[in-house]
Amino acid sequence: MATRLVDWKREKECDVYLASKPSPGRPTCPGGQSAGLGVNADLLADAGGTARWVERLGPGTVVLRGFAGETAAAIWAAVGRLTKLAPFRQMQTPGGFRMSVAMSNCGEVGWVTDPAGYRYAERDPDSGRPWPAMPELFRQLAATAASAAGFADFVPDACLINRYAVGARMSRHQDRDERDLTQPIVSLSLGLPAVFLFGGGQRSDAAVRVTLTHGDVVVWGGPDRLRYHGVLAIKPGEHPLLGACRVNLTFRKAR
Ligand code: SIN
Ligand code: FE2
C-alpha cells in the first residue's frame, strides 16, 4: 500500500507535490518511488535535525512534526507563568458570540476580539496592562521553524495563546489582521491532538484535514498566507503534560 504523508483531499495539489523528481543524493523509498515531497531532506537539515519529519501542505506550507521536541515542556511551563499575568479568557466575536477557545497573548501586541471587531492591542483589555513580554525561547522556536520552512528572518512581535478544552473548536478563518502579509504564520501545538482544517483562499474551498499532535509546528506563508484554516472540536483525552486540554501558540509579525 502506498504511504501518503498527508491526508490530501484535493487530487490536483496532490499531483503537483507527489510529481516532484528525486534529486541526486536524496534518499528514496527503498523499492519504490522518490521520497515524494521533494523537500523533506533539506527542511530537516535546515531545522537543525529537530523536526522528526516534514509534510508539505502547499507551496508555502509545511508541518514540522515534533519540531518543538524537548522544548515543548519548557514552553508549557512558560505558558503557565504568562497566563498568571494575563489569564485565559473567552473573548466575544464581533457578532456577539463567546468563543469556545480561551485566549491570552504575549509580545508587544496581542490579538483581541470584542463587539467592536478584531484587532491587535498593546494592552490586555481585561487588566489595562501591557501584555507580558514574549520569552526568548518562543521567539527562537518561531524563527527557527520559519527558517526551516523557507522564511528567513522571521521576528514575531505577537504570540496568541489559544487554550482548547475538550469540545472547543475554531471555525474557519483567515489570519489577515497583520500589516505585512509577506511574513508567515508559525503555529505550535501542545497537548491533546487536534484535527486542523487547511482550506484554500475562499471560505468554500475544500480543506485538507491534518491531525496535529504535541510539539508539531505548522508554518504557512507566501502564496498560502491567506488560506482559510480552523480546528475541529477537540476529542476527550488526557495528555501526560497538559491533561484534558490542547494549547496552540500562534506567532505572528503583526506590526
Ligand atoms: C488559530 O488559527 O489561531 C489557531 C489554530 C490552531 O489552534 O491550531
Ligand atoms: Fe488563525
Image: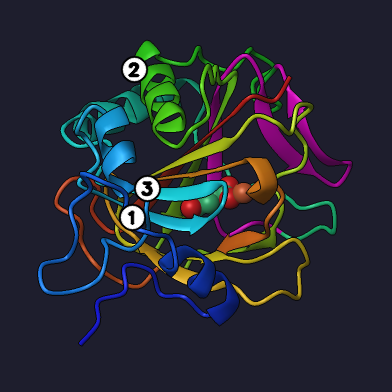
Label 1, label 3: how far apart the Cα atoms are: 33 Å
Rendered position, 146 above or below 216? above
Secondary element at tag 2: helix
Q: Earlier in the sequence, mark 2 or mark 3?
A: 3
Q: CA distance from mark 2 to mark 1?
A: 22 Å
> At x 47% / y 64%, what residue is drawn?
17
* Residue with the mark numbered 2: 137
Among numbered discs 2 and 1, the one appearing first in the sequence: 2
Q: Main secondary structure of the magenta part?
A: strand
**Amino acid under label 2?**
Leu
Quarter of the figure with residue 129: top right
The amino acid at mark 1 is: Cys
Question: Which quadrant holds residue 25?
Answer: top left
Question: Mark 1 — residue?
Answer: 245
Judge whether residue 90 can be spotted in this image. Answer: no
| Residue 44 vs residue 71, the one in the foreground | 44
Q: Give the structural element (helix, strand or loop) at label 3.
A: loop
- In the picture of the structure, the residue carrying the numbered disc 3 is 39
Ligand 1 is within 8 Å of the C-beta of the residue at disc 1: no
156 vs 162, nearest the viewer: 156
Neighbour tally class for label 2: few under 14, some 14-19, many 20 plus, Cα within 10 Å: few
- Dot 1 or dot 3: first in sequence order is 3
Name the residue: 67% across, 33% down.
111
- Closest to the observer: 128 or 141? 141
For the residues labelled 2 and 3, the Cα–Cα distance comes to 27 Å
The percent coordinates of residue 240 (x first, y second) are 14, 51
Q: Magenta region: which residues?
A: 98-122
